[in-house]
Amino acid sequence: MRVWLQHHRLSLAQTASRLARSPFATALNVLAIGVALALPLGVYSLLTNLEVLSRKVSVDPQLTVFLARDATKADSSAVEGRLRTARGVRSLRFISRDAALAELGRSGGMSEVIASLPQNPLPDAFVVTLSTSDPALADRLELEFKALPKVAYVQADSAWVRRLDALIRLGRTAVVLLAGLLGTALVAVTFNTIRLHILTQRDEIELCRLIGATHAYIRRPFFYLGSLLGLLGGFAALGIVAAGLALLNRDVGMLAQLYGSDFRLGMPGPGEMAAVLGSAAGMGWLGAYLSVSRHLLGGARK
Amino acid sequence: MAIISLHQVSKRYPGGFEALKTVSFSVESGEMLFLTGHSGAGKTTLLKLIAAIERANGGTVLVNGQNISSMRSAAIPYLRRSLGLVFQGQKLLYDRSVFDNVMLPLIVTGQPYREAARRARAALDKVGLLTREKANPVTLSGGEQQRLCVARAVVNRPAILLADEPTASLDAAYADEIMEMFNAFNQVGVTVLVATHDQQLIGKYRKRVLRLDHGRLQ
């Protein structure tokens, strides 16, 4: 056990010093991995932020139910009764056609147009606030209300939020694809780096075999090298994303201020960061494993 | 008791060259002997078979009671730890000091650092390089480099020392020096097998001589 620990400690120290001996090459490698990881991570962060934003906006999902123009007061109260008892409805507000016209008149520039109308073109309407922002509920109620007598049209105000939702979902799929592709690139980069290290250490490897080094002993430093490269690349990716978000936040802050909001783009959470670092190290290890299997085991007898 | 024994061993390299043809002999534990023959007679191949660097095409090679021909490759490192190898063209590592070169076999086999350092210094002392422990091997003379190879080969206290033309590139004085070292290791019980074509050197010691001619033992 102690021997095993000593071997690991020595391997790690050896690996670190090997990386430190060629700082420029190491930095470029780490940067390549960092950029490859930063792309999906950055897009992922933006999507997560968008999702947060869309959830903030759609806290009060509403349906507007427009009645037919020829609806009587009795029709209107019948509809109101049905709306009130429908499941999933939190509150209800009636806007009479006269009130709606007056509102329209107040909103500037329209008063002359309205005055010239022979009659009020607007229908009575109910603004229905739903209890949850579940898009399925909104869909169901929209259909249900449409079927009520004397209801002309139901408008779902949350339609654009749903579209955004669908877009975000699409984006997530794209991120998974991107991560898969660039993860493969990471494996390829470490594969090649490890191959070069194996080639430059041919003599030492050959010698170690002759003096009784086990396969595990010979392979170990390369596994450390791969994982370490992946891990450093992961840190580089986090750094790149943090810098990118900070840059974007200057503009986002200004934009949000115009909307009276203090919205800022946030970094991925600690769990997600740990996942990024972990999988980067894992992929580095995989690249090393493939490279070592390909380039070292060929001479097993030696 | 035979520590090395070959029975009807032959080795054919890819391409058809037959390096060894039905070679049989055995070496007693604690013996020192020479292996000689013209260049290309199969001396190096024979040593490589014993060290499990090459695999025989026929016959059995027993070292320390283990059959090398049928050995799993995972077991080979442990066999090699009982061997000290001084091979031609065996490289010293020039990215580290003389001391670290000798430390390598001990680190590979997982010796505790302090004990390993003590043994490495003892081995360097034995070959007269203790004062050069911090030097880079590249600054050593040819004879000193060869002595460093010897120190590295014996630092793990192997039961068997295999040397392939250990004096080839050395002048007579250095060659004698190296040979005397091998003799001294043999005195303390190490089995020593030296392959050399230097008849003069062989003549100085009254040891058994195996003579190879075109892959056959004479």
Image (tube, helix red, strand yellow):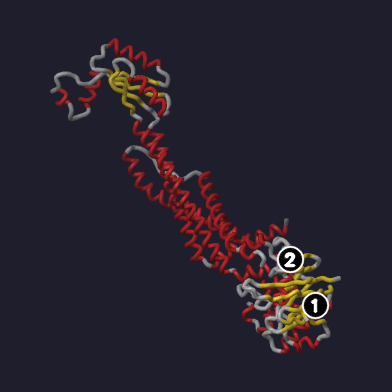
Q: Nearer the viewer, residue B59 or A251?
A: B59
Q: Quadrant of residue A143?
A: top left
Q: At 24% from the left edge and 24% from the top edge, which residue is drawn?
A: A103
A7 relative to A56, above or below = below
Residue B217 x %, y %: 77, 79
- Label 1 in the same subunit as label 2: yes
* Mark closer to the observer (1, 2): 2
Q: Nearer the viewer, residue A68 or B19?
A: B19
Question: Which chain hosts label 2?
Answer: B
A208 relative to A264, above or below = below
Amino acid type, residue under disc 1 in the picture: Phe
Q: At 42% from the left edge and 47% from the top edge, which residue is drawn?
A: A43
Q: Which residue is mark 2?
A: B69
Could you tell me if residue B130 is visible in this image?
no
Q: Nearer the viewer, residue A120 or B43?
A: B43
Could you tell me if residue B144 is visible in this image?
yes
Tell which circle, 1 or 2, labels the residue nearer the N-terminal end. 2
Quarter in which the C terminus of chain B is drawn? bottom right
- Give the CA separation, mark 1 to mark 2: 28 Å
Residue A194 placement, left or right of A161: right
Q: Which residue is mark 1?
A: B185
Mark 1 neighbour class, 10 Å CA radius: few under 14, some 14 to 19, many 20 or more: many
Q: Which mark is residue A296?
A: none
Residue B208 x %, y %: 82, 81
Residue A51 placement, left or right of B135: left
Quarter in which the N terminus of chain B is drawn? bottom right
Residue A81 x %, y %: 36, 13
Q: At 38% from the left edge and 31% from the top edge, which residue is drawn?
A: A58
Work out which residue is located at the far top of the displayed protein and give it: A74
Mark 2 neighbour class, 10 Å CA radius: few under 14, some 14 to 19, many 20 or more: some
Residue B175 placement, left or right of A241: right
Q: At 46% from the left edge and 45% from the top edge, which residue is drawn?
A: A176
